[in-house]
Amino acid sequence: MRILRFDIVSIFPGMFESPFGDSIIQRAREEGLLDIRLHDLRDYSLNKHRKVDDSPFGGGVGMVMNVEPIARAITAIKEEVPETRTILLSPGGRPLDQKKAWELSRLPSLTLICGRYEGIDERIRLHYVDEEISIGDYVLTGGELPAMVLVEAISRLLPGVLGDPESVVEESFHDDLLEYPQYTRPRDYEGLKVPEILVSGDPKKIRDWQKAEALKKTAQVRPDLLEKNKRV
Ligand SMILES: C[S@@+](CC[C@H](N)C(=O)[O-])C[C@H]1O[C@@H](n2cnc3c(N)ncnc32)[C@H](O)[C@@H]1O
């Protein structure tokens, strides 16, 4: 059995309780597949008011997170788990995709740093983190939601976390395709019918239809994915 350990550094560790205390993540934690540890960044502040931010050098709006508490948190985690990969959640990072989620799911330990305010002192990015990941081209108020997204995207790929391991290879982005359309009962809902082929009982025809639909949808919505693999 493989265990993935997450250490998450945030000024709002309480935000993680509900999303990590329900559903698949909770079950994976109970089964010992996931070991999630939350660290309150303020515990690493040497300031008597537990302050972790200050105004930016050179002026500008907002506050910047100090280097010291984050550096101390990362160092303390590394002492315990030297092999950990340290990731800074940031809109300036490399966009997260399914390939990256697979790559990270194979590692034993990940440390996630959640920013707030106007961001983090650049020395953290330059000297303390291994990579910087963005969850998309938009700006959120903090790195907590992006960290949750990353934990969820990675955890469901771990062996044993999802009931049916086949389901993860059938999903969108596998093979750079979006998923084909899915239907369930009833066959006819007020005249809205399920495609006949899906109830034909012919597995080969069904697979061909699913493949063609996946290609059609990807070409319509995400032609860049097809372009990537030179399918068009
Ligand atoms: C308000 S944002 C800082 C934005 C920064 N001033 C900029 O323009 O790039 C505060 C924190 O939220 C997190 N964050 C916001 N948007 C994000 C995104 N798209 N992906 C990952 N983290 C994000 C980061 O941890 C960031 O340090």
Image: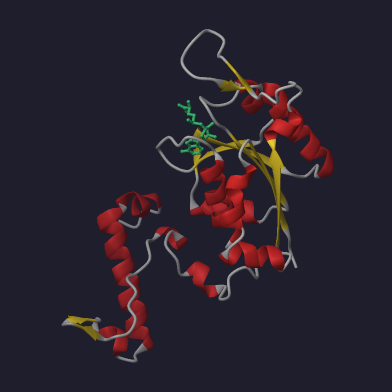
The quarter holding residue 50 reads top right
Farthest residue toward the front? 49
Q: Is residue 42 left or right of residue 135?
A: right
Q: Position of residue 154 (x, y in %)?
A: 58, 56
Quadrant of image for the N terminus: bottom right
Residue 200 or 52: which is nearer the viewer? 52
Note whether residue 66 is visible: yes
Residue 154 or 216: which is nearer the viewer? 154
Query: Is residue 132 positioned above or below 97 on the image?
Result: above
Note whether residue 102 is visible: no
Residue 57 or 232: which is nearer the viewer? 57
Q: What residue is rendered at 75% in x and 21% in y? A: 48
Q: Position of residue 182 (x, y in %)?
A: 34, 74
Quadrant of image for the C terminus: bottom left
Farthest residue toward the right? 79
The quarter holding residue 77 reads top right
Q: Is residue 145 left or right of residue 195?
A: right
Q: Position of residue 14 (x, y in %)?
A: 62, 46
Q: What residue is rendered at 49% in x and 19% in y? A: 62
Q: Position of residue 143 (x, y in %)?
A: 54, 38
Q: Is residue 44 left or right of residue 147?
A: right
Q: What residue is rendered at 62% in x and 51% in y? A: 104
